[in-house]
Image: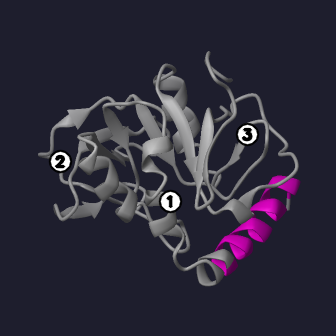
Amino acid sequence: MTAKQELRAVMRAQRKRLSREVPDAARRVADHAADLPPGHTVALYRAMGSELSAEPLAAALMGQGRTLCLPVVVERDAPMVFRLWSPGEPLEEDEAGCPAPLPLSETATPDLILAPLLAFDGQGQRLGQGGGYYDRTFARLPYALRVGLAYAGQAVAQLETDPHDIGLHGVLTENGYRAFHETGILR
């Protein structure tokens, strides 16, 4: 097992623990929706397992007049696409087994992407599940702002990165929004 695989296992357990210990985290995150960077079309995700739920945040963003979309895996080794979505609309599993809008939903290009994660560090690096879906998608959409959505307790001192890893511009937790890089594109 590699160091990244070991860290993923540790951080999955940590996130599961945090989901029990901070049950109001999703509501608290939504309270900080106004602190997010601007973006008309915002990509969220539907939480799986112990991922921090984005549902209360979705309602807050819609209240701000933002358009929402969800990622869809249509090919295993390709960037994700995004389809417009509103809370309550039907979903089906995509190629990765994640809840996604139906194929007849209109595609969208987000200018703000909120991504789930296992861990993040103070330099804006993100540890995901290991499938590379978000890194491939970030590379395809280099001008979209990238923000992690996480429990504050998912922060670590420093993450080991690989050349294909693409960092975040900020992170939103139950404690508020933290920007890592004010301008420019972080790689």
Quadrant in the picture for residue 112: top left
Type of the residue with mark 1? Val
- Height in image: 28 above or below 108? below
Of tags 1 and 2, which is closer to the observer? 1
Residue depth check, mark 2 versus mark 3: number of the one nearer the observer: 3
Pick out the residue farthest to the left: 104
How far apart are the alpha carbons under marks 2 and 3? 32 Å
Image coordinates for residue 90, horizontal then vertical, percent = 17, 63
Crowd band around label 1 with a 10 angstrom C-alpha radius: few (<14), some (14–19), many (20+): many
Q: From the image, tell me which residue sits under label 2.
A: 103
For label 1, the SS is helix
Residue that appears at 83% across and 45% down: 159
Residue span colored magenta: 2-17
Horizontal side, residue 179 vs residue 73: left or right: right
Residue 131 rendering spot, x and y as whole percentages = 59, 50
Q: Nearer the viewer, residue 7 or 66?
A: 66
- Among the two numbered marks 1 and 3 on one chain, the one whose residue lies closer to the N terminus: 1
Three-letter amino acid code at disc 3? Gln
Coordinates of residue 107 in the picture (x, y in percent)? 22, 35
N-term mark: 1 or 2: 1
Q: Secondary structure at mark 2?
A: loop
Residue type, numbered disc 2: Pro
Pointer 1: what residue?
A: 29
Q: Is residue 43 visible in the rendered structure shown here? A: yes
Quarter placement of the N terminus: bottom right
Check if mark 1's residue and mark 2's residue have beta carbons within 8 Å.
Answer: no
Magenta portion: prevailing SS class: helix
Position above or below: 144 against 96: above
Residue behind mark 3: 125
| Picture quadrant where residue 15 is located | bottom right
Which of 57/146 is in front?
A: 57
| Coordinates of residue 151 in the picture (x, y in percent) | 63, 63
